[in-house]
Image (cartoon, helix red, strand yellow):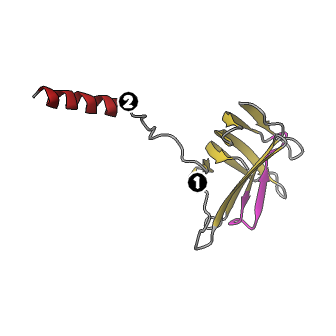
Amino acid sequence: MASAKLFVVLILLVISSCEKSNPDAQLPDTVTANVNGSAWEKKACWSCMGGGSALRVSYQDSLFTLSAEDNARKIILTFGIHRVNAVGVYELTTRDKNFGRLTDGNSVGRDYFTNNQKRGKFTVTQLDLVKKTMSGTFEFEASDLSNPNLTVKVLNGNFNVKLD
């Protein structure tokens, strides 16, 4: 009887010491956002079928680029951030600085960029150069290159990626 109680206590200790997973944690190689009021998600896909999709990340000499493409929905989100070397907020403005871009293939190839009037922010909340991972949030408003009166809003964005 005493050995059964000891066994139960040991089992409870083992279970309570296990690392608990966070159900709200975003999966690796995932980008999510709300694009003009619609939920959008892109996960890395190495052998996608039916149109395919891609998630490309580059981190070279503290220049970070991220492109999340969904061929089925014909939407591409792209970011270019200069001098990312620490956790922090990076303002999205013009293409020669830090920028956010949304390409919408559903609207005759509309190409929306952040600029001095339509801005946003890209927040790095985690950067681990040893494990080569980065995660954070983003939001921006951008206008179409050929018609600045057309705009797009990308809100509640999250990313969790591996760095190349």
Task: Please say if 148 is above or below 123.
Answer: below
Q: Position of residue 89 (x, y in %)?
A: 73, 31
User: Magenta-highlighted stretch: main secondary structure?
Assistant: loop
Q: Earlier in the sequence, mark 1 or mark 2?
A: 2
Task: Please say if 34 is above or below 54.
Answer: above
Q: Nearer the viewer, residue 130 or 88?
A: 130
Q: Position of residue 152 (x, y in %)?
A: 70, 50
Q: Nearer the viewer, residue 129 or 95?
A: 129
Q: Position of residue 94 (x, y in %)?
A: 86, 43
> Which range is magenta?
103-117
Please say whether residue 39 is visible from this viewpoint.
yes
Sort mark 2 into few (<14), some (14-19) or many (20+) by Cα contacts within 10 Å.
few
Which residue is drawn at the image coordinates 70% and 58% (left, top)?
Answer: 76
Residue pushed farthest front? 3
**Residue 33 lies within the magenta run:** no
Residue 51, image quadrant: bottom right
Which residue is drawn at the image coordinates 71% and 42% (left, top)?
Answer: 140
Q: Which mark is residue 25?
A: none
Circle 2 SS class: helix
Q: Is residue 4 left or right of residue 126?
A: left
Q: Nearer the viewer, mark 1 or mark 2?
A: 2
Tag count: 2
Q: Which mark is residue 40?
A: 1
Q: Which mark is residue 17?
A: 2
Q: Amino acid at mark 1?
A: Trp
